[in-house]
Image: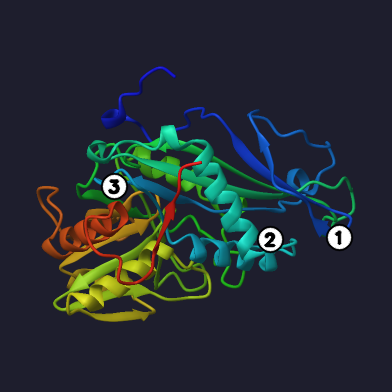
Amino acid sequence: MKELDWSNLSFGYIPTDYNVRINYRNGEWGELEVNSGEYVHLHMASTCLHYGQQVFEGMKAFRGKDGKVRIFRIDENAKRLQSSCEGILMKSLPIDRYEEAVIKAVQLNERFVPPYESGSSLYIRPLLIGTSPQVGVGAATEYTFLVFVTPVGPYFKEGFKATPYVILREFDRVAPKGTGRYKVGGNYAASLTAGEKAHSLGYSAVLYLDAKEKKYLDECGPANFFAIKGDKYITPKSESILPSITNNSLMTLAKEIGLTVEQRPVLEEELATFDEAGACGTAAAISPISRVDDIDNDTSYVFSKDGTPGPICTKLYNKLRAIQYGDEADKYGWITFVEKI
C-alpha cells in the first residue's frame, strides 16, 4: 500500500483490502462472506433501485495511544439499523450478526486504521439493500448486507471550528410522520438541493425547521442540533429527527459534567437565548455553529464572532474524543476492542 498522509486525509473514499457481505435468501440469513471487490452485482429490477429499500449506518474505529483499535457504540448502531429496517419493511439483521460483520471488516482492514496522533479514524459503513427483482411496489424477498471501511479525516475541512448555518424555509427535510427517524438514503437525497444552496451562499449546512409549522428546530444538514444555555444542554425532540448516537452520548456526558439535559421541541426564537450551538453526528462528532442566519426574516443568531468554539462544546468534544481514542476511561461500556486476526 502506498503510504497515506494520515494527518491530511479528507472525508472521502479510499479503497481498502476487503469488505464483508451476508445475503438473505429463502427466508434466512446466510454465512458471512469476505469479498475483495468494490462492486455489487444487482438485478436491474432490485427493490433498492426502484423503491428505496435501502438503509445504512455509520460509525468509526479509532487507534489509541496503546495501539489498540476501538469501535464506538457498535450495539447502538446495530439497534438503529434494525429500527430503520422495520420502518421501511426490510428484513432486519440480528444484532450479533451485525456486530460480527463490522468487527470482521475492521479486522481485515486493520492496517488502514490511522495512527493515534493523526487525528483521523476508520469510517465504517454498513449497508443493507433489497435485491430481489420485482416491478410491483412491495417489500423485497432477498437482501444483501455489506460492510466496507475507509480511512477518513475531518468531515468539515475547517476541523473543530465554528462555522455558519442557514435556515431555508423553501425546503423541508422530511414529512412529520415520514422516514426522518430512520437512516435511509432517501432522507439524504431529499436534502441535497438545500445543502447545495446553503454551500453556494457560504454556509456549512441548513438548519431545518419542522415541516408542519415552520416554528420548531429540526436537524441541521445530516446531523442533530444541540445548544448550550447556562447550565443546560438543549436538543430538539420530534418524530421526524434521526436519533443520533453521538447526540445520545453527548447528553450522557453533559450530565456527567453537571449540565441539565432538555430534549424537547425547540422554537426558532430560542436561538436568541443560547450561549453556544452545534451540530453533532458520527462524521464530525461536534461541528460548532458560529451563527444561524434566517435570511427570510433578515435575522442572525450569533454564538461565536471569531469562529472559536464555546467552552462547553469544546469540553464535550474533547471528552467524547478522549473516550473514543482510549485516553479516558470508558465507564459507559461504549467501546468494543478489535483483536488482530
> Which image quadrant is residue 141 in?
bottom right
Estimate the x, y position of residue 47 in percent, counting from the top left: 79, 49
Residue 94 lies left or right of residue 135; in this view the side is: left
Q: Which of pointers 3 and 1 lies earlier in the amino acid sequence?
A: 1
Residue neighbourhood size for the residue with mark 1, other residues' Cα within 10 Å, grouped as few (<14), some (14–19), many (≥20) = few
Q: What amino acid type should be assigned to the residue bearing mark 1?
A: Gly
Q: Nearer the viewer, residue 340 or 270?
A: 340
Residue beneath label 1, please? 27
Q: Nearer the viewer, residue 239 or 68?
A: 68
Q: What amino acid type should be assigned to the residue bearing mark 2?
A: Leu
Estimate the x, y position of residue 333 in percent, counting from the top left: 38, 69
Residue neighbourhood size for the residue with mark 3, other residues' Cα within 10 Å, grouped as few (<14), some (14–19), many (≥20) = some
Q: What amino acid type should be assigned to the residue bearing mark 3?
A: Gly
Q: Which mark is residue 64?
A: 3
Residue beneath label 2, please? 93
Rendered view: 218 above or below 135: below
Question: What residue is rendered at 72% in x and 53% in y?
Answer: 53
Q: Which of pointers 2 and 1 lies earlier in the amino acid sequence?
A: 1
Residue 188 lies left or right of residue 11; in this view the side is: right
Look at the numbered discs 3 and 1 and tell me whether their residues touch, using CB distance below 8 Å. no
